[in-house]
Image: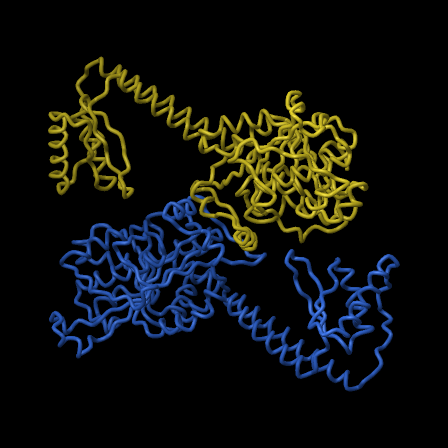
Chain colours: A yellow, B blue
Amino acid sequence: FIEQLPSIRETIRNATFFAIDCEFTGLASDRTIFPFDTPEEVYLKMVENSPHYIIIQFGLCAFRVEPQEAGKEKEGEEAKDTEPRVSYKCFNFFCYPKGRTNVFSCQGESMRFLADNGFDFNRLFREGLSYANEIDEQRYRADLRERQVSRAATILAAAEEESNDEEPKADVNAIPVPVELQQQLDDTAESIEEFLQSDRPELIVGKGNAFQRKLIYQLIEQRFQRKVSTSTVSLENNQKAIKVERKRTYEEEQAFDDQRRARENEDLETSIGMSLVLQELSKARKLIIGHNMLLDLFYVLRQFFKPLPADYQEFKRITKEYFPLLLDTKYLCTNAEIKVNVNSSVLAHVYDAVSQPPFSIPTVHPELPDHQYSVDDEKKHEAGYDAYLTGLCFLGLVSRFKVNLLQLHKDTTLRHYMNRIFITRLNDVNYIYLNGKE
Amino acid sequence: FIEQLPSIRETIRNATFFAIDCEFTGLASDRTIFPFDTPEEVYLKMVENSPHYIIIQFGLCAFRVEPQEAGKEKEGEEAKDTEPRVSYKCFNFFCYPKGRTNVFSCQGESMRFLADNGFDFNRLFREGLSYANEIDEQRYRADLRERQVSRAATILAAAEEESNDEEPKADVNAIPVPVELQQQLDDTAESIEEFLQSDRPELIVGKGNAFQRKLIYQLIEQRFQRKVSTSTVSLENNQKAIKVERKRTYEEEQAFDDQRRARENEDLETSIGMSLVLQELSKARKLIIGHNMLLDLFYVLRQFFKPLPADYQEFKRITKEYFPLLLDTKYLCTNAEIKVNVNSSVLAHVYDAVSQPPFSIPTVHPELPDHQYSVDDEKKHEAGYDAYLTGLCFLGLVSRFKVNLLQLHKDTTLRHYMNRIFITRLNDVNYIYLNGKE
């Protein structure tokens, strides 16, 4: 993932608009929502009784719209000179939190639904990406920085002490060695002496329990401090042990620490994982399309950015801060002109409807074979596929308004649908308007 | 599963003792447990702060001990005439709750641990068995019985009404038909008339919305009550519709209902699923062996029987009620004689230790190829394999005491270890004694 990240980021930077879709471990109950609730009431209810379900698959389809190349038209192509070229690249990310303290909820029915639709849970739990919200990310970064600074200081202090060339002090806090372990410790000391005479690069000792290792560390500090460096290693069966190497010089020690720091920094990026993609998506400040995207939006904010605020206006504010331009195709389907030909706003039904006149979906070109989908090879309820389909539906729906795809945000009809997120089951105002009062 | 259930039950009835092991979606935190807590304090803490983790894999290894057949000994076998023959049959059940209201928790680390050990989550969520604790089971059974009784009454009432041969009454509560739907309804009426003239066995109508179907039911009641029977069906895309068939006679209606009842009863058994196996296991009242089985016991009781009580004595009482004879091999490892040769009580280490003198594991014979394991084909952390390994460890450990496997419960040494469940991290009394005070 870390290797692919630069290319993912570039795709996001080069895109014109995005379609997204998420798969969850459960759906917040909508039983508490009544037909005449206001959008604010719906929001508050959802924040209150939303168990800790998570996004386990995030589908991102990046669409790129470019003016048709002048050269190509001449090569006998059909006369669609005014139509821009649309290409896309789809990603399908698996994610879940891997830590000991990370607990999430699952709804039996949702898991069964996903399983019935071919969701690959083995890939999820084997290869799924980590993520971190802003608070956790800041903590991870601060903790690591602190650890690295303190380690650098220790290395420096050790080097200075070395040059003082003092005799090791007798440690009054030394742990007394139990009689029954003395022989074992003597054997270890002997094997270290032997190792120092040999030309082997390293020696593994201390395969006993934690207390035995503590005694060995003490032994090394007392008798071999100037001669060997140690580090803790994990053996195959999770057994811990001590790796003994010849004492490194200050320069070697620093080079060693540089390597370690680089590895730690990469591990940190890995543990922030998916959030890096979402951060890039937020930074792009481009149009993001979803179909019935309220829950997706809720879960994305909570999982990758920050907890959902208890205040409705604050929710609107942070949503716009992270995603300034959203469009919900389910809400777009409430348009009177569209409604005539699209009588069900279920995603697959919308696709069927917009595949026929008076709509027309422009040809979309996959940028890379690894990131393409086909509507013939149905992968319903795979997030990447649903994101792709949402994008196609959007393109189909807006064909009705003869929208200029190169200037989406300037379209006056579309502007009425921007930042209005559809809410199901409401009779009255059936959307949340992020830019102001509903 | 329902087809295999009788054979599973028979295996349980014929077994001499069982070994069990479970895999969970998470482990109750042991951070709150201190070395000098009493067993009661540990119990209460675990009940209090145990999120809703569940058992997703239940391994059951049924061992059967029989006297060596007299005939076989003569056939030149080794002279082990006093040793009984041990055979086994292992089961590895996947389970999770499938309903809409069933929410369970997962710990990221546990899921990753299982995934790393090859746990098949796709099988879990595609084929996993349902289960129900006693309260849910009683409710399911009562609900179904009520539904069936009321349906039988309706069928009878309809038959009696029929024989009265009254004219259908004009229904004052009839829903007025909106003008725009009248044509559609007339078309439906016509198609039913046509159907009745034809020799087709059935007709599907009412593919519209719920209100349209309501109008059609009303139409049928008013005009076709004596001529057709209806039932609701689900079409491919989850669209509901009405199946219209020629009116069944009372006898046909009853036969139809008998079939339906049989199907419902089987569905009920399926939804109680895994609990039926655990109930059989409880009914057997035989020795059940686990390694470090405290959590297994907690989760088994909670998931398949009843919520864990807030009272410690009550917990002991219900545990003995369901499982009168338990043995924790981890606690057995605290035996002084055993400790000499078994210095780690991790399951795999115990197995290695008891594979050597002074221990000896008797040969165990798989009863069926589908239910066998081999220690060479390691499937560590698959519940069925771990149950099998626990059984082998038990057999190895008790070989030290020259226990008569045919009369396990009478052994005086073993009796000291029965119903004492090991608690990790305790310095003082490190077990729960189900039969009395620790």
On-image quarter of the C terminus of chain B: bottom left
Residue A261, percent from left and from top:
37, 24
On-image quarter of the N terminus of chain B: bottom left
Is residue B122 found left or right of A34 in the rendered image?
left
Relative height, residue B326 to residue A346 (above, below):
below
Please report the residue visible at 38 percent of the width from the left and 21 percent of the height from the top.
Answer: A149
Residue A408 is at least partly visible in this image: no
Please report the residue visible at 59 percent of the width from the left and 72 percent of the height from the top.
Answer: B142
Toward the viewer: B135 or B348?
Answer: B348
Please report the residue visible at 61 percent of the width from the left and 39 percent of the height from the top.
Answer: A388
Residue B150, percent from left and from top:
67, 76
Residue B63 is at least partly visible in this image: yes
Residue B374, percent from left and from top:
27, 58
Is residue A248 found left or right of B123 in the rendered image?
left
Number of marks in picture: 0
Toward the viewer: B296 or B336?
Answer: B296
Relative height, residue B160 to residue B58 (above, below):
below
Toward the viewer: B134 or B374?
Answer: B374
Residue A296, percent from left and from top:
61, 41
Toward the viewer: A349 or A9?
Answer: A349
Relative height, residue B393 to residue B410 (above, below):
above
Is residue B167 found left or right of A174 in the rendered image?
right
